[in-house]
C-alpha cells in the first residue's frame, strides 16, 4: 500500500527526532512492502522565521490533504516575546483544531529495562493511557485582555459542552474495554461548573459501558496519586489543560518524557502523531535528544491511521529490544554508563527491526 505522510519537523529538536522516525518508517516500508511518501510542511517558529507567520495556509493544506501527519515539536525562547497570534504554539493548536483532533492518546508504560530510571520507589506494572480532550476547554475558550478591578487582566474561559464530553469519554470507555477495563475521569468538580457538567455526562455515558469500572478523581488528588502509585490507573480521561499537565507528570512515572508518544485523532483515520515532549531548545542540534518518543509516535500512526498492526508491533518490539540491549540516550543513562546520540540510538533501533 501507499501512504502519504506530511512531516512537520518544527523547531528545536523537532527536525532531529522526526528524521529518526522517518528512517524507521522507511525501513518498515522496505521490510513489509509499503510505500510511505513524505511531504514536508513548515510550521511553528521555522515558519515564522521564513514567512512571518506560524501556520501558513499552504502548510496547513498539506496536513489536511495527507493520510496522516508526523510532528516533531514547535516553540523556542526566541519567540517568547512575540504577540500571541504569532507564537509557534499557534501552529500546533491551529492544526489540531483544523483537523478536528479532539482526542489525544498519550500512553505511559514502564519498560522493564527502565525500572531503574523511574524516579519512583519500587515501580511495577505502570501502564496507563491518558486520553486528553484536545480542541476544547480553556485552550480554545473565549480569551482576551481587559480592564479589571486590579488593573489590566487576562482571561481565558473554560467551557465544555455535553457533546464534547460525550465523544471523548465514549472513546475512553471503548479503549478501556480493550485494556484492563477501568476509566479514571479527572475533574475539579468540587469547584468548577465545567467539571459538574463533565462529571454528569461521563456518568450518563458510562451506563452504556457496564463492563468498565469508572471512578472520579479530583485533579489535585490525581497529581498526588500518580506519584504515590500510578499502577492503580488504566485509562485516564480528562480535559485539555488537566491532560496537558498530568501527561507530563505521567511521563516521569515511566522514566523520561523522551519516550512518550501520542496520537491525536478525529472520527476519520487521518490523525496527527507527535511526541509529548517539546522542542527542548537547550539540547537542539547536538545529537543528544531521545528519538524514541517520535519513533513510537510513528508506530502509533501505523496502528491507528493505517491499521498496520504487524508493522506497529515490529517497531515497538525493536524499540523494546534496543532498550533491553542496554542502549541509552542521555535522558535514560545511569551515571558513568555509555550514552548514545540521537543518530546512534536510531541506528540501534533500525538494526533490531
Ligand atoms: C503538548 C504541549 C502543547 C500543549 C503546547 C506546545 C502548545 O505542551 O502537546 O502537551 O499545551 O498542548
Ligand atoms: Mg504539554
Image: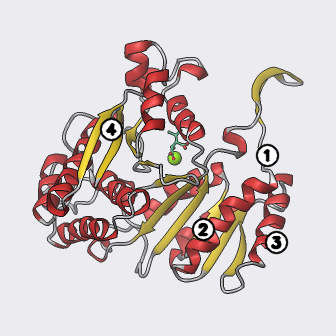
Q: Residue at x 28, y 36 (%)?
A: 15
* Residue hosting label 4: 14
Q: Which quadrant of the view contains residue 187?
A: bottom right
* Residue hosting label 3: 204
Q: Which quadrant of the view contains residue 320?
A: bottom left
- Mark 1 or mark 3, earlier in chain: 1
Residue 350 left/right relative to 142: left
Q: Looking at the image, which residue sits at the far bottom?
A: 211
Question: Badges 4 and 3: C-beta atoms under 8 Å apart?
Answer: no
- Mark 2 or mark 3, earlier in chain: 3
Task: Tell me the quadrant of the picture where the N terminus can be found.
Answer: bottom left
Alpha carbons under labels 4 and 3: distance apart: 41 Å
Question: Badges 4 and 2: C-beta atoms under 8 Å apart?
Answer: no
Q: Viewer-proximal residue, 334 or 276?
A: 276
Residue 347 left/right relative to 53: left
Question: Badges 1 and 3: C-beta atoms under 8 Å apart?
Answer: no
Above or below — where is 69 with respect to 214? above
* Residue hosting label 2: 236
Above or below — where is 141 with respect to 59? below
Q: Which mark is residue 340?
A: none
Alpha carbons under labels 1 and 3: distance apart: 19 Å
Above or below — where is 259 with respect to 22? below
Question: Badges 2 and 3: C-beta atoms under 8 Å apart?
Answer: no
Measured as percent of width and height from the top left, residue 257 is found at 39, 55
Q: Which mark is residue 159?
A: 1
Amino acid at each position: 500500500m501507499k501512504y502519504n505522510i506530511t512531516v512537520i519537523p518544527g523547531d528545536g529538536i523537532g527536525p532531529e527526532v522526526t528524521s529518526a522516525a522517518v528512517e524507521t518508517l522507511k525501513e518498515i516500508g522496505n521490510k513489509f512492502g509499503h510505500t510511505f511518501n513524505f511531504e514536508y510542511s513548515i510550521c511553528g517558529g521555522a515558519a515564522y522565521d521564513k514567512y512571518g507567520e506560524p501556520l501558513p495556509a499552504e502548510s496547513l493544506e498539506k496536513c489536511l490533504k495527507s493520510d496522516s501527519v508526523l510532528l516533531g515539536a514547535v516553540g523556542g525562547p526566541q519567540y517568547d516575546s512575540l504577540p500571541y497570534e504569532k507564537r509557534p504554539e499557534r501552529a500546533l493548536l491551529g492544526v489540531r483544531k483544523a483537523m478536528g483532533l479532539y482526542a489525544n492518546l498519550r500512553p505511559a508504560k514502564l519498560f522493564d529495562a527502565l525500572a531503574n530510571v523511574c524516579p519512583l520507589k519500587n515501580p511495577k506494572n505502570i501502564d496507563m493511557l491518558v486520553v486528553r480532550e484536545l480542541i476544547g476547554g480553556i485552550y480554545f475558550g473565549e480569551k482576551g485582555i481587559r480592564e479589571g478591578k486590579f488593573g489590566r487582566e487576562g482571561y481565558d474561559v473554560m467551557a465544555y459542552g455535553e457533546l464534547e464530553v460525550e465523544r471523548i469519554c465514549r472513546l475512553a470507555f471503548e479503549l478501556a474495554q480493550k485494556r484492563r477495563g477501568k476509566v479514571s475521569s479527572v475533574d475539579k468538580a468540587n469547584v468548577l461548573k465545567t467539571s459538574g457538567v463533565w462529571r454528569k455526562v461521563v456518568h450518563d455515558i458510562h451506563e452504556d459501558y457496564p463492563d468498565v469500572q469508572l471512578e472520579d478523581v479530583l485533579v489535585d488528588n490525581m497529581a498526588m496519586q500518580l506519584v504515590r502509585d500510578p499502577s492503580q490507573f488504566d485509562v485516564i480521561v480528562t480535559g485539555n489543560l488537566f491532560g496537558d499537565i498530568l501527561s507530563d507528570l505521567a511521563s516521569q512515572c515511566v522514566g523520561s518524557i523522551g519516550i512518550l508518544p501520542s496520537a491525536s485523532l478525529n472520527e476519520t483515520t487521518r490523525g496527527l502523531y507527535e511526541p509529548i515532549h517539546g522542542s527542548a531548545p537547550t539540547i537542539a542540534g547536538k545529537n543528544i535528544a531521545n528519538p524514541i518518543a517520535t519513533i513510537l509516535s510513528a508506530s502509533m500512526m501505523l496502528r491507528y491511521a493505517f491499521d498496520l498492526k504487524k508493522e506497529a508491533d515490529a517497531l515497538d518490539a525493536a524499540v523494546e529490544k534496543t532498550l533491553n540491549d542496554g542502549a541509552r540516550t542521555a535522558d535514560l543513562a545511569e551515571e558513568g554508563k555509555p550514552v548514545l546520540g540521537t543518530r546512534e540510538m536510531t541506528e540501534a533501533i533500525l538494526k533490531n527491526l
